[in-house]
Amino acid sequence: MSTTISEAAANATISYNVSFPEAQAHYADIEMHITGLKQNTLELKMPVWTPGSYLVREFAKNIELFSAEANGKAIASPKINKNTWQIVTKGISAVTVKYRVYAFELSVRTSFVDASHGFLSTTGIFVYPANMLHSPANIHITPYKNWDKVSTSLEMVNNDPFTRHSPNFDILFDSPIEVGNQDVFGFDASGVHYEVCMYGGGNYDKEKLSADLHKIVDQEVAVFGENPNKHYVFIVHNRQRNGGGLEHLSSTVLGASRDNYANDKGYQSFLSLAAHEHFHLWNVKRLRPIVLGPFDYDTENYTTNLWIAEGFTEYYQGIVVRRTQLFPVENYFDALESEFNTLENLPGRNVQTVAESSFDAWIKAYRPNENSNNTTISYYNKGAIIGMMLDLEIINDSKGKYKLDDAMKYMYTQYYKTLKRGYTDAEFKAGFEKFAGKKLDDFYAKYINGLTPVDYNKYLGYAGYKIVDELADKNDATLGITTGTTASKKIIVTSVQRGTAGYIDGINVNDEITAIDGTPATDAANLIAGKNPGDKIQVTVTRDGQAIILPVTLLKSTRVKYNIVSVDSPSEQQLAVRKKWLSL
Ligand SMILES: [Zn+2]
């Protein structure tokens, strides 16, 4: 079978037409034509996940009215598993397939169609012929009503913006398509044409935004030494409240809040998101863990390296924006402190290593539950802190000759450009060691594969900084629970933090807290106002319709709030590391 398929693939021509006759009801209608077939059966598959978002999303669930025809007659196209249709093509050289996709999931990794625009997250739109991922395809877009623009990194065919070409399916599945009346502007940077496509309006200043994105692009190109694209597209979905982003080879999709561009904090957070997703065009899209490409679109693709692919990208989003000098260094410290405090206030830091967090992204990070904070950490969060630690380690050990950038550039050149493959865990470790000038076995054992608490003062100390806990002198009592309030003002427990009074004395998620020491509980934020650590109280809860009185001994809050401050008299060496690290 594989011989006939590769022969067929060499000759097969694939094209799609996407139209939106019922855009208002959230449908995209797909017509696929395959000619030049020379095989007995044809299997058409839809990916179950979209690269960059590590969750099986079963995109085939949105497909309706799948049908096939050949020579003007309907032919059978039964489903043989959740995401595969099979067509008998013996003696048939051309097949037309039609189906509809319901697209009403608002996110950067799923498709959404309404009367105002169509966003095609291609993994959930296009079925592909099994074993023909390397085949090229043309995509024609028939817009709805007055939609007049298509924004995507796919190249035009015959200068027609509505007809695009994809050299293979890996590229098609990494090239989202925006169709509608988006506001499009652009700039040129490092020999690449950048297009910014704004859906949904917003209070952005085109000139300023273009100039600032240009600065970010320049800083990121400087890390890797080249910009591998010719054309890059920022697709931005502006909504009342929106966020998040997804990286692609030559484009990205960003969520933004439309009124957030005019305030400093909102604007900085948008630029950080853009810096993050754009940094991915190297880190993960090209410089990648070995299992992340070529992708298996049928199942989970497991890696322990998302702390590099995502965590370092999070570290760089901050340091790159710092390097543009658009905001003061204090803003950068705010972001770093927030990374520290997130990790240090999470009981999961004593349970899950960053390598495990990455491997289990599919079943844990992307499927959180009420106990997640007790049992997991984020590879974004701890990975960003590890990025900082290694950056400072390399700067310090090399006496300012190198920084993390040098390791990233070396790995990109060596694995993406020269060897044309992904890296293994051991290979990235060797890359760091080359620039740190020493073995990192101990570092890996402690921080990547172990649960050793981060020694902030050691690493920040290289640059003459230390952390100070703002809450160190506090003696606040806490129950260690979070609650939500229902429409009827019931106070319901939503999580219980490991090691706290609530955890030890048996308060449960979903308990309704009705009284403290016999007094009705009405103010969720002040359940234990006036109480101290060591006080014994009675918490009345309703659990499964029954009242239960729980004796609880209050404990001191272990919450920390770290601030980064300079040591008293930093040495010359510390000041040199500081300058190199923060681009002061
Ligand atoms: Zn990312």
Image (tube, rainbow, N blue to C red):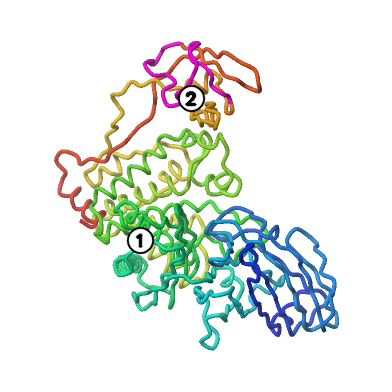
| Up-down relation of residue 5 to residue 27 (above or below) | below
Residue 230 location, x and y as percent? 43, 78
Res 322 → quadrant: bottom left
Residue 535 % position (x, y)? 42, 12
Residue plotted at (59% across, 73% down): 144
Is residue 483 toward the left or the right of residue 35 in the image?
Answer: left
Residue to which mark 2 is pinned: 499
Q: Residues within 10 Å of mark 2 (few under 14, many from 20)?
A: some
Element type at mark 2: loop
Q: Type of residue at label 1?
A: Asn
Of the 4 image quadrants, the one containing the N terminus is bottom right
| Residue drawn at point x = 50 percent, y = 76 percent | 149
Residue wearing tag 1: 203
- The answer to whether any part of residue 241 appears in the image is yes
Residue at coordinates 27% horizontally, 51% vertically from top-left? 396
Which segment did they paint magenta?
511-536
Relative side of 294 to 475, left or right: right
Give the left or right position of residue 142, taking residue 517 as reference.
Answer: right
Q: Amino acid at mark 2?
A: Gly
- 410 in relation to 345, above or below: below
Under circle 1, the secondary element is loop
What is the CA distance from the residue labelled 2 to the residue labelled 1? 46 Å
From the image, state whether disc 2 or disc 1 is nearer to you. Answer: 1
Q: Residue 261 in the image: state x and y as whole percent.
A: 34, 58
